[in-house]
Structures are given as C-alpha cells and as structure tokens.
Image (cartoon, grey):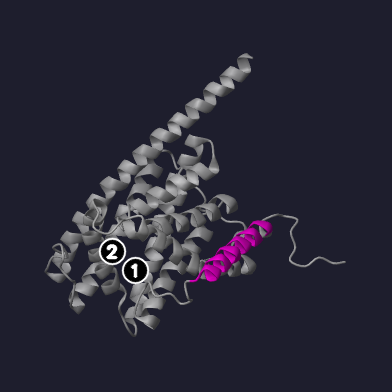
Amino acid sequence: MVRRRLRFAQVKSDQLQSLSRALIFLGLILMSTVVASVVGEFAGQIVFGKSTLLMPGATPEGEGMWWQLHFSNFFSQAIGFGGAVFIARAMWNGSVPVGLKMTPRSLGPSALLLILLMVLVTGPFMAASYELNVLAIPEGSVLEQMFKPMEEMLERLTSFLVEADGARRIVVILSVALLPAVFEELAFRGALQPLLIRATGNPWVGIVLASIIFSAIHFQFYGFLPRVLLGMLFGWLAHRSGSILPGMVAHFLNNAGAAITLWITGSMTEDVFPLEWWTVLLSLGLTVGAVWAYDRLLKPDFRWFRAN
C-alpha cells in the first residue's frame, strides 16, 4: 500500500512537472517569436533598407519585398521556434527535443512511400474540413469581423511569398516548406507534445492539445480545423515511430505540395479533385489505410510479402 501511494505520488509529481514545463515552453515560444520579429525587422532594414511591416489591408509587392519577407521568415522560424527549443534544451539538461533519432523502418523506402501517400490522399478530406471550418464562422458575425481581415491579409502575404518562377522556386521550397518542417516539428512534436503527453498521461490527449496549439499559433482561423488534423497526423507519426523525422518529411511534403498547387493552378486552395461526398470518404479511407500500413510497417514481425 505504501509503495502504491509513493508510486502514485511520483506519477502526479512527474505530471505536474511536465505541465509546468509545457506552460514554460509556450512562454518561451511567445518570447522567442517577439525577439525573432525584432531581429528580423532590424536585420531586414540593414540589408534591404526598408521595413517589412505591413499596414492592415496593405498588399505586399515588388521583388525587393519578396526577398526581404523570405529573409525575415528565416529569423521567424530559426529564432521563433528553434530559439525556444534551444533555450528549453539548455534549461532542462537536453531532455527536449525528443525523437531526433530514427529507426531504419520509420524512414525506409516503404515508409517514405506511405508518408507521401498520406499527404497526397488527405486532400479532399482536408478541403472538406476547411469548408466545415468556414461554416463555423457565420457571415456577418462578430467572429467574422475579428478573423476575416487578418485571414485575408495572411492569404495575400502567403500567396505573395509562394508566387515565383525559375530558380526562385527553390527559395520558396526552402523558406515555406523546409524551414517550417524542421523548426515547427522540433518545437511542437519534439518538445511540446512529449511534455503534454506526460502531463496528461494519455498520448492522444497530448497529440490533440499540441495540434490545437500548433494550429492556433498560425493565426489563420479559417484553416484552423484542417491544420489541427494535419498536426495530429504529424504528431501520430512522431509518437508512433519515436522520431520527429517522419513528421518533418510529411510537413515538408504538405507545404511543398501547397506551393506546387499554386504554381500549377494559380491557387493554393484549388481542389485538384472534385469535392464530393464520395471523394471525401475515399480520401478518408485511403488516409486511414496509409496510416494503418505505416503502423504495421513499424512492427518488427511485419513483412510486405510472406512466404507460403
């Protein structure tokens, strides 16, 4: 009985410590984001000679502004998210980020193929979740008045950043796909998610909470739900494989795919497939199938083909 009580007390103590660290880490992200904005703005003015700050309703334009915004995005990602992880790692003796290593199965050829399939087949399902998200913000409501101006500004900014041709498309892939895939996964799946899992004692609760925070911090509330769902996919990949690298790959493929969609169709939100009930169900079924196959792939006794 005494041992059981001691064990229970230890579990509660570990949970409280993890919860406090999760809250501290969120504070670090907010602090680092502010520092990143100041450093990026200061460095941008030195290099380019002008500010990147946009007034509400303004539209970014010009090649110089395009380069400067990508320049500032590096500071936003590296200092804003990477800086928070670096400080937390120093504070907590290297206990975060979790999952820097990988097993051969988690990113082997078959695994990479399944991760690519997951990202590709989620399209109609994510599009449907976006439409559901839009319906949750009624026209003419206070929520629309709060969110729509910021949403429109961020959409214009994102489209401006992604629009490119020739060699500049390499810059886009590095800036809007690779940097977020590395630094956001380090922060949200490498540091915050493990802390929330330990704090709640439930992997799925931790994954969902980390995904909600991940989506909210982007401040694009018309895409809040699909970003939560994507965060859950990245979070599951990290938790199931024990490595944040598969989630980084999925994150990169998703963002790169959005950029490529704009280059091909002229819109990042263009539906490649018709948004019908059957395409949504098919998308959901294929996604579940790819997730199941990846889960099976990680089991030591699993083989794609078995001898009779």
Question: Mark 2 and 1 residues: CB-CB less than 8 Å, in contact?
Answer: yes
Identify the residue shown where x is 35% and y is 76%.
Answer: 267
The kind of residue tagged 2 is: Asn
Q: CA distance from mark 2 to mark 1?
A: 7 Å
The kind of residue tagged 1 is: Ser
Q: Residues within 10 Å of mark 2 (few under 14, many from 20)?
A: many
Task: Decide whether residue 122 is among the magenta residues.
Answer: no
Compare residues 107 and 235 and report the one nearer the observer: 235
Q: Residues within 10 Å of mark 1 (few under 14, many from 20)?
A: many
Question: Which residue in the rendered view is the most extreme toward the bottom?
Answer: 166
Compare residues 299 and 132 and report the one nearer the observer: 132
- Number of labelled discs? 2
Compare residues 235 and 172 and report the one nearer the observer: 235
Identify the residue shown where x is 44% and y is 73%.
Answer: 257
Q: Would you identify the image quadrant in which residue 169 lies? A: bottom left
In this figure, which residue is indicated by the disc labeled 1? 175
Q: Quadrant of the N terminus?
A: top right
In this figure, which residue is indicated by the disc labeled 2? 73
Looking at the picture, does residue 166 appear above or below residue 50? below
Q: Secondary structure at mark 2?
A: helix
Region in magenta: 276-296
The picture places residue 102, in percent across and down from the top left corner, at 57, 56
Relative placement, left or right, of 154 versus 289 is: left
The picture places residue 192, in percent across and down from the top left corner, at 43, 45
Task: Decide whether residue 287 is among the magenta residues.
Answer: yes
Q: Secondary structure at mark 1?
A: helix
Relative placement, left or right, of 31 versus 46 is: right
